[in-house]
């Protein structure tokens, strides 16, 4: 009888612990998805064409490299 109560208590504790792990995994998955979507949006909307104004006086745009020199 005492052993049965102890076994039930252990099973209940294991069940609670695994639920917490699932929540952590889901949270990590959501964060990873948000990072992937942010990187994909940055790549999709990044404009490599020549800008109008140089970032500093005397800067020269390099079309070959896609940035200012």
Image (spheres, rainbow, N blue to C red):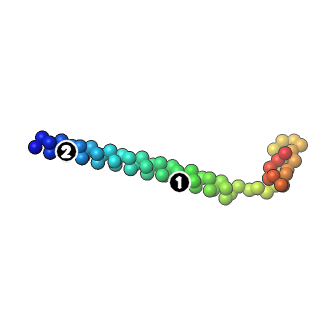
Provide the residue designation for mark 1: 33
Q: Is residue 1 left or right of residue 14?
A: left
Q: Is residue 51 visible in the rendered structure shown here?
A: no
Dot 2: within a 10 Å radius of its alpha carbon, few (fewer than 14), some, or many (20 or more) residues?
Answer: few
Quadrant in which residue 13 is drawn = top left
Q: Position of residue 41 (x, y in %)?
A: 63, 56
Q: Secondary structure at mark 2?
A: helix
Instruction: Report the quarter where the N terminus lies.
Output: top left
Q: Residue furthest front?
A: 3
Q: Position of residue 48 (x, y in %)?
A: 76, 55
Distance between mark 2 and mark 1 Cα atoms: 39 Å
Provide the residue designation for mark 2: 7
Please report the residue visible at 82 percent of the width from the left and 47 percent of the height from the top.
68
Name which of mark 2 and mark 1 comes first in the sequence: 2
- Given this view, does label 2 or label 1 mark the residue nearer the observer? 2
Q: Is residue 38 left or right of residue 50?
A: left
Instruction: Report the quarter where the C terminus lies.
Output: top right
């Amino acid at each position: 009888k005492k052993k049965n109560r102890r076994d039930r208590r252990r099973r209940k504790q294991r069940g609670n612990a695994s639920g917490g792990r699932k929540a952590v995994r889901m949270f990590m998955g959501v964060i990873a998805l948000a990072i992937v979507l942010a990187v994909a949006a940055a790549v999709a909307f990044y404009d490599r064409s020549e800008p109008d104004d140089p970032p500093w006086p005397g800067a020269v745009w390099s079309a070959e490299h896609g940035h200012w020199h």
